């Protein structure tokens, strides 16, 4: 079974510190959080593998998030745990992990990931809050890095954990797929192999507070279609299906792949696209990583921490993004929503994940079209922006 990823391990030229790593044979990376967090932990895995090619690297993640790494060629095995595990299976997992690895790395500052790293690794590295409550977790770790949730990008934060291991960091997240996933996409979208350019619109994130408007997606899709581009609509099939249905019904010429493509399949789809437009989701991180020109709509989230990491961004320590303002880095145009409160760092205006964010609801389509047009022109795809769109 062939595996593919958007960068290829051979492109990583990372110096090896053989003196520090000659006895390192196995590592567990713990990232028990959301899919986006798991994807943003893959630079740690890629850095370790590039530095020590024979190293066996496993990951521990929440059930349901493993799809982000199922085709990752750097990972030997993925362990999964429920978000709220029952006692018996949890104890069974702990017994299986007990001192199994030379090193365990926790990219999260929480209690359970730190504990799991201590259980699994004979040498443990993690990130922790520098507060009094974390005193007991500091005792579990051989080395810890202060966690910064505001001023340091998640990728850069994770890569700091490599310093005590003598590993040179590689920053771009790894997006991978297998032959069967690519074939599945080609079956659903046969025109993917034609010369006509296509744009991927990822319209439904997991949480409502990250959504844009139906009318915005419809006008953007029609604008792209009117200029000869195939529009491919992707998203999560969920209880918000009426939202997706309105978009699909309003774009009858679009290719509907909502809920029909796996995450690895989306990686393949994105790798051949001329344009991607989406909101603050794991898929936007994937689009940035594979190098597709991307317009990403950001509302309440902090772009310094969560902005998509552009492919081959040069720094491994600095965030690509400022906290405020629409901005461009490499293949990513981060378009920030409307309002002086942006980013508020809240989960919607009503402070829960099912609430909407006014900054995104008020984001006018002409701003998105202008950004998309700029990205397309750089690809040699000339589409004129109509006056008063």
Image (tube, rainbow, N blue to C red):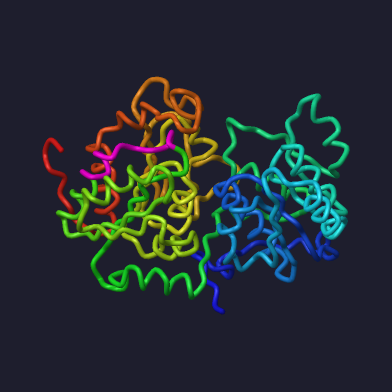
Q: Residue furthest top?
A: 340
The boundaries of the magenta stretch are: 208-219
**351 or 276, nearer to the observer:** 351
Task: Confirm whether the magenta stretch covers residue 115.
Answer: no
Q: Give the image quarter of residue 387.
A: top left
Split into 4 quadrants, where in the image is the N terminus?
Answer: bottom right
Q: Give the image quarter of residue 356.
A: top left
Residue at 73% over, 40% down: 127
Q: Is residue 37 left or right of residue 374?
A: right
Q: Report the number of numbered marks.
A: 0
Q: Is residue 226 left or right of residue 101?
A: left
Q: Residue furthest bottom?
A: 1
Split into 4 quadrants, where in the image is the C terminus?
Answer: top left
Q: Position of residue 359 (x, y in %)?
A: 36, 28
Q: Residue furthest left?
A: 387
Q: Is residue 101 above or below residue 334?
A: below
Q: Is residue 272 above or below residue 83?
A: below
Magenta span dominant secondary structure: helix
Q: Is residue 369 left or right of residue 242?
A: left
**265 or 340, nearer to the observer:** 265
Residue at 61% over, 64% down: 13
Q: Position of residue 342 (x, y in %)?
A: 42, 25
**212 or 12, nearer to the observer:** 212
Q: Position of residue 27 (x, y in %)?
A: 77, 59
Q: Position of residue 209 (x, y in %)?
A: 43, 33
Residue at 63% over, 60% down: 46
Q: Is residue 263 above or below residue 111?
A: below
**138 or 89, nearer to the observer:** 89
């Amino acid at each position: 079974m062939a595996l593919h990823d958007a960068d290829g391990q051979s492109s990583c030229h990372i110096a090896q510190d053989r003196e520090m790593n000659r006895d390192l044979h196995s590592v567990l990376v713990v990232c028990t959080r959301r899919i986006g967090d798991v994807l943003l932990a893959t630079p740690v895995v890629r850095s370790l593998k590039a530095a020590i090619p024979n190293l066996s690297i496993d990951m521990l993640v929440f059930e349901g998030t493993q799809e982000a790494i199922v085709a990752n060629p750097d990972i030997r095995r993925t362990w999964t745990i429920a978000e709220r595990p029952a006692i018996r299976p949890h104890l069974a997992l702990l017994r299986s992990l007990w001192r199994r690895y030379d090193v365990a790395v926790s990219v999260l500052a929480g209690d359970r990931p730190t504990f799991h790293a201590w259980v699994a690794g004979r040498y443990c590295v993690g990130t922790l809050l520098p507060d009094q409550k974390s005193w007991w977790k500091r005792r579990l770790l051989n080395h810890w890095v202060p966690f910064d949730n505001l001023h340091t990008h998640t990728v850069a934060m994770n890569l700091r954990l490599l310093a005590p291991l003598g590993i040179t960091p590689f920053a771009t997240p790894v997006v991978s797929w297998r032959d069967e996933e690519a074939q599945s996409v080609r079956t659903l979208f046969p025109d993917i192999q034609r010369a006509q350019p296509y744009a991927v619109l990822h319209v439904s994130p997991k949480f409502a507070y990250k959504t844009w408007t139906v009318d915005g997606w419809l006008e953007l899709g029609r604008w792209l279609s009117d200029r000869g581009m195939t529009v491919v609509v992707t998203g999560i099939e969920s209880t918000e299906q009426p939202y997706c249905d309105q978009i699909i019904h309003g774009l009858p010429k679009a290719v509907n792949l909502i809920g029909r493509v796996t995450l690895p399949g989306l990686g393949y789809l994105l790798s051949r696209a001329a344009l991607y437009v989406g909101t603050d989701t794991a898929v936007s991180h994937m689009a940035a990583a594979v190098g597709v020109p991307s317009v990403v709509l950001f509302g309440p989230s902090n772009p310094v921490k969560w902005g998509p990491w552009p492919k081959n961004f040069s720094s491994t320590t600095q965030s690509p993004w400022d906290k405020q303002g629409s901005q461009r880095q490499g293949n990513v145009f981060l378009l920030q929503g409307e309002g002086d409160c942006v980013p508020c760092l809240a989960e919607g205006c009503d402070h829960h994940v099912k609430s909407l964010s006014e900054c995104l609801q008020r984001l006018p389509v002409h701003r998105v079209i202008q950004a998309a047009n700029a990205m397309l022109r750089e690809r040699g795809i000339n589409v004129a922006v109509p006056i008063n769109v």
